[in-house]
Image (cartoon, rainbow, N blue to C red):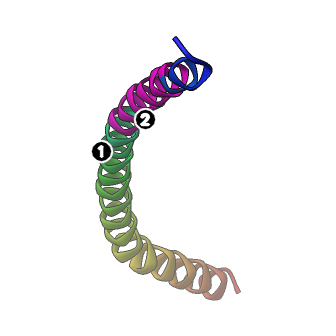
Amino acid sequence: MTAMEILVIILSIFLALFLLVGIVLAVLLVRVTQQIKRVTATAERTASGIESVVSGVSKVATPAALANVLFKQFGKRKKK
């Protein structure tokens, strides 16, 4: 075997290793991307649910706060 044949063999082995590593990394990247999509979808649903709860509470809280202020004002007038 000549030096060039040995060099070709070494380079082809490294090329095969890098190709396998690249394929494994690509598969892992796809899996991580899918997990990120699932997490963001869950976070979006949670934020939407919290937003609807806050909206419902604000609809109830605003009239209750207004009624509380009015009752305090009428209570002050009755005491006078």
Residue 22's disc is 2
Figure check: 40 above or below 60 = above
**Residue 62 among magenta residues:** no
Provide the secondary structure element on which disc 2 rests.
helix
**Front-most of 26 and 45?**
26
Q: Nearer the viewer, mark 1 or mark 2?
A: 2
Asked if residue 72 lies left or right of residue 53, the reply is: right
- Up/down of 2 relative to 64, above or below: above
Using residue 47 as the reference point, say whether residue 74 is left or right of it: right
Magenta region, residue range: 9-27
Please tell me in which quadrant of the rendered image residue 74 appears.
bottom right
Q: Measuring 31% from the left and 47% from the top, which residue is drawn there?
A: 42
Give the amino acid type for the residue marked by disc 2 in the picture.
Gly
Q: Amino acid at mark 1?
A: Arg
Disc 1 from disc 2: Cα separation: 24 Å
Q: Quadrant of the C terminus?
A: bottom right
Check whether the beta carbons of the residues at disc 1 and disc 2 lie within 8 A of each other. Answer: no
- Image height of 40 relative to 16, above or below: below
Q: Position of residue 56 (x, y in %)?
A: 31, 68
Residue 52 spot, x, y in % from top left? 30, 66
Image point 50% across, 27% down: which residue? 8
SS class of the residue under badge 1? helix
Q: Residue 26: image x %, image y %?
A: 37, 39
Q: Is residue 12 magenta?
A: yes
The local crowd at label 2, few if under 14, some if 14 to 19, many if 20 or more residues have their Cα within 10 Å, is few
Q: Nearer the viewer, residue 33 or 54?
A: 33
Query: Pointer 1: residues within 10 angstroms few (<14), some, or many (20+)?
Result: few
Q: Which mark is residue 80?
A: none
Mark 1 = which residue?
38
